[in-house]
Image (spheres, helix red, strand yellow):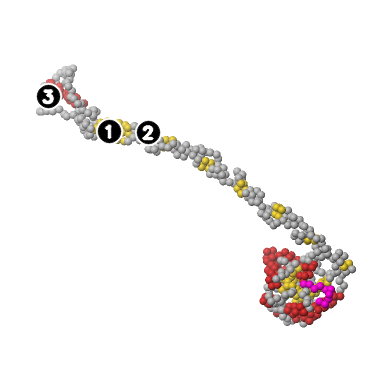
Amino acid sequence: MKKLLFKILIAAMLLPIMLVGCDNGESNLPTEAPTEAPTEAPTQAPTEAPTEAPTEAPTQAPTEAPTEAPTEHICQGVEWVVVSEPSCTEKGEKKLVCECQKVLETAQIDALGHTAGADATCTAAQTCTVCGETLTDALGHTAGAEATCTEAQTCTVCGEILADALGHTAGADATCTEAQTCTVCGEILTDALGHTAGRKATCTSAQKCTVCEEILTEALGHTAGAEATCTSAQICTVCDEILVAPLGHNYVDGECTRCQQKPKKYFTLSFDDGTTQDLRIIEILKKYGVGCCTFNINTGLYGADWTESVSDMVGTPVSHVRFTKEELETGIYDGFEVAVHTSTHPSLKYYDDLPLSMAVAGINNEVKKDAANIKTLTGIAPVGMAWPGGDTEFTDKTIELVLKYTNIKYARCTTSTYSFALPDRFMKWYPTCSFSDAKLFELAQQFIDAECTEDMLFYVWGHGFEMDIPWSHSYDEFEQLVKMISEQEDIVLVTNAEFYELFKSTIPS
């Protein structure tokens, strides 16, 4: 009995160590059970038996003795199971699990370490291809030469533009002789423009650049023609400018000491307005073969009837009707000079006080336009005119405008000189007298009888309607005047323009 109790006690002490149930937690046993049972029983009993037996025996023996010892758990299939995967920088974990899901052991899995990607560049870091962690920071650019006007600043490593080209800073605009350059780098931005040649050089004017006015060719200078004579100026053979004015006759005892020419008597007529009475005047002139008459007309008043206003002006009924354009186109004035009397017969001094542009426009409309219409009618451009309205309706400023902006070279006035002197200037050409003047025939006779010791001019002007006024000279008296003048062999009959051409070199406009 004592031996049985001792064995039970020993088994109770060893059982917790040797045998552990599957549901009691993990086991530290090896993964496989021993292949053989121990061959021998313990060789030695415990060194000491209990010093004394229990003082009392159990009051009751167990009802049943164990019939069989407990069965041991032996792990058959085991495997490592990953609990957490390792990363580049963190360890993982795994456990050893048997087929019954008992965890026999746990262990760490080493971190994988980074997988380096492409090398770092100027702008991109080197990163791990697995986790993306930066392994090497971007290197940053290495700046090359500073940006200039035309070249950008770039990275010497990767070539990326760090600063755009600055662009040129334009200097002064290009001129005829100087290029436009950049004020920073000096590069030419615009070539020198070169000169723009103006009018060719003349005798008196250099050729200049129209932009900068630099002289490109000096004035050529005049080329003198034949020497001046009594009636002819010395002129430049290139530009026709007068170099020496005509010397004029030097009459002594009725003969010029230079050219031996004898002085002459000249006779001319002019009638204004272009009225229907001119038909009768032309008839009389043609009867005696006299063409020394100039008719001054208004082409802006074709067919105008001023009978009423003219009758009021002269104090008696008189017709004043201008020719129509169609009538003039039939050639009424063929064989005679037709000159300007302005388009609409205004007072031209009205334009004196206007701004220049308006004044020029007015002069062109009245004088230049009338001249153009006359050229269309007759085929001849007029060079002269009669001032409309009389001598109070123009001024020296008016003369200046007409000379500068038209081709008119002479202009007849209305104030009588009662002399046979040549005019001092053609734009103020005063006549001897009017046709209606009471002294007409007296002056005519004086002219015929006068001894000609110098050039003389008898100039008679008027209006055709005056011959219809009772107190004026009639058509018959006009015919008498034409007859007596035309019979004189020493009188030269000229139109106004013909006389101008004869004396334009010695008498200024």
Name the amino acid, label 1.
Answer: Trp
- How far separated are the C-alphas under marks 3 and 2? 69 Å
Point out residue 409 in the picture as x, y percentages from the top left corner. Answer: 75, 67
Instruction: Name the foreground residue: 290 vs 119.
Output: 290
Look at the image and give the residue range highlighted in magenta: 486-495
Which element carries disc 1, helix, strand or loop? strand
Point out residue 148 in the picture as x, y percentages from the top left corner. Answer: 57, 42
Q: Name the residue under label 1.
A: 80
Q: Name the residue under label 2.
A: 113
Quadrant of the frame with the N terminus: top left
Q: Which of marks 1 and 3 is nearer the N terminus?
A: 3
Q: Mark 3 points at which residue?
A: 58
Q: Which of marks 2 and 1 is nearer the N terminus?
A: 1
Q: Please check the rendered image and state whether residue 491 is part of the magenta-colored stretch, yes or no.
A: yes
Which element carries disc 2, helix, strand or loop? loop
- Corner quadrant of residue 186: top right
Name the amino acid, label 2.
Answer: Gly
Q: In this view, does 390 lie above or below 180?
A: below
Q: Residue at x 55, y 40 (%)?
A: 146
Chief SS of the magenta region: loop
Mark 2 nearby-residue class (10 Å; few <14, some 14–19, many ≥20): some
Point out residue 196 in the picture as x, y percentages from the top left corner. Answer: 66, 54
